[in-house]
Amino acid sequence: QVQLVESGGGLVQPGGSLRLSCAASGITLSLYTVGWYRQAPGKQRELVATITDGSSTEYEDAVKGRFTISRDNAKKTAYLQMNSLKPEDTAVYYCNAKRRIPTLRDYWGQGTQVTVSS
């Protein structure tokens, strides 16, 4: 059974930092592209950052320079380091693992709440 379990969310003041973790089981995470998505109330889920199996990274413009995605394949865990947090970063953050070869596999975690407020 495949599971992605996010952790590390919480309440933080503007300007603060959080590190989200996504622990995978039941898959060889090193073969997957991992993405962090977020969904704010009343808004669509949006892609925040991705890291490929080769560790190439991409970021949404709004988080460039503030967020860093990384992975530790030995620990089967991906991370999202979030610095200089803003109230508009408030959302539920989801981890996704996807591969297309040899067949499409697409897995999601249950999400972790991040609230940025003073």
Image (cartoon, rainbow, N blue to C red):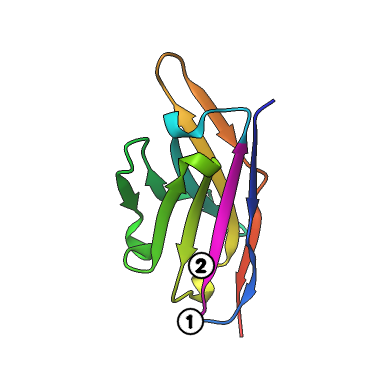
Most distant residue in the top direction: 102
Residue 14 is situated, as x and y percent measured from the top left of the image, at: 52, 81
* Mark nearer the N terminus (2 vs 1): 1
Depth check, front residue: 49 or 117? 49
Region in magenta: 15-24
Residue 29 is situated, as x and y percent measured from the top left of the image, at: 50, 34
Res. 27 visible in picture: yes
Residue that label 1 marks: 15
Amino acid type, label 1:
Gly
Residue 71 got which mark? Answer: none
Q: Which image quadrant: the C terminus?
A: bottom right
Say which element carries label 1.
Answer: loop
Q: Residue at x 37, y 64 (%)?
A: 62
Looking at the image, is 107 positioned above or below residue 101? below
Residue 117 is situated, as x and y percent measured from the top left of the image, at: 61, 80
Residue 7 on the magenta span = no
Front of the two marks 2 and 1: 1
Residue that label 2 marks: 89
Say which element carries label 2.
Answer: helix
Q: Which image quadrant: the N terminus?
A: top right
Residue 17 is situated, as x and y percent measured from the top left of the image, at: 51, 74
Most distant residue in the front direction: 74
Q: Residue at x 39, y 46 (%)?
A: 50
Total labels: the figure holds 2
Looking at the image, is 114 positioned above or below residue 104? below
Amino acid type, label 2:
Asp
Q: Residue at x 46, y 15 (%)?
A: 103
Crowd tier of the residue under label 2, counting other residues whose Cα lies within 10 Å: few below 14, some 14–19, many 20 or above: many
Q: CA distance from mark 2 to mark 1?
A: 11 Å
